[in-house]
Image: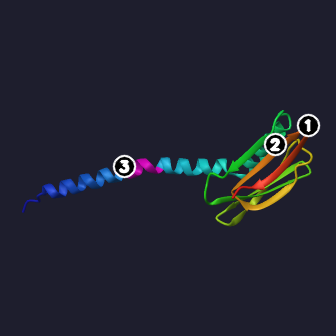
Amino acid sequence: MKSQVAPADIITFLVISVIFVLTMSRIPKIYKEFFSVLALSTSDVVAHDLAGLISMSAAAPDDIIIEYHGRSEQINYTVELKDRDITVEMIVDGEPQNRTVENVYAVSDLQGKFEDCKKFEIKKIRTGLDNYYYFNVIE
């Protein structure tokens, strides 16, 4: 008895092979995107970036608005600004991470704390020679 391969079997094998190859070629891109979002969203990066932007805003001659919009739906932050220290804790899917990061900024009168927020802004309003800072959550 001879074994025979039907044309339908060959077509089915080719379709499954093409689907498999296409799926496997997408997986590295998905992992890369996921880990890049996670890396850019860590509390270290957020605290460092915000501290630098706040410090640079002090030297700006006009009003400044710094807006932070989280890059992932699953990641929120608890942010506290007090006595020139910024403390950021990342919250993933409602669970606080064990790592809280502190950084220092150069503005003395910026105070505030918000918990479990994704979007927030820091405003510097210049009136005459005085700078006034406000820290708000964006809804």
Q: Amino acid at mark 3?
A: Leu
Question: Going by the picture, which residue comes out furthest to the bottom?
Answer: 94
Question: Bounds of the magenta span?
Answer: 21-27
Secondary structure beneath label 2: helix
Residue beneath label 1, please?
Answer: 128
Q: Amino acid at mark 2?
A: Ile
Residue at 11%, 59% in the rendered image:
3
Which percent across, then down, holds residue 131?
89, 41
Whichever of callouts 3 and 1 sits on the residue coming sooner in the sequence is: 3
Which percent across, then down, holds residue 125?
84, 43
Residue beneath label 3, please?
Answer: 22
Whichever of callouts 1 and 2 sits on the residue coming sooner in the sequence is: 2
- Left or right? Give the position of 75 relative to 111: left
Which percent across, then down, holds residue 94?
67, 66
In the picture, the disc for residue 54 is 2
Which percent across, then down, holds residue 21?
35, 49
Is the C terminus in the top left, top right, bottom left or bottom right quadrant? bottom right
Q: Is residue 22 magenta?
A: yes
Q: Of circles 1 and 2, which is in front?
A: 1
Secondary structure beneath label 3: helix
Residue at 29%, 55% in the rendered image:
16
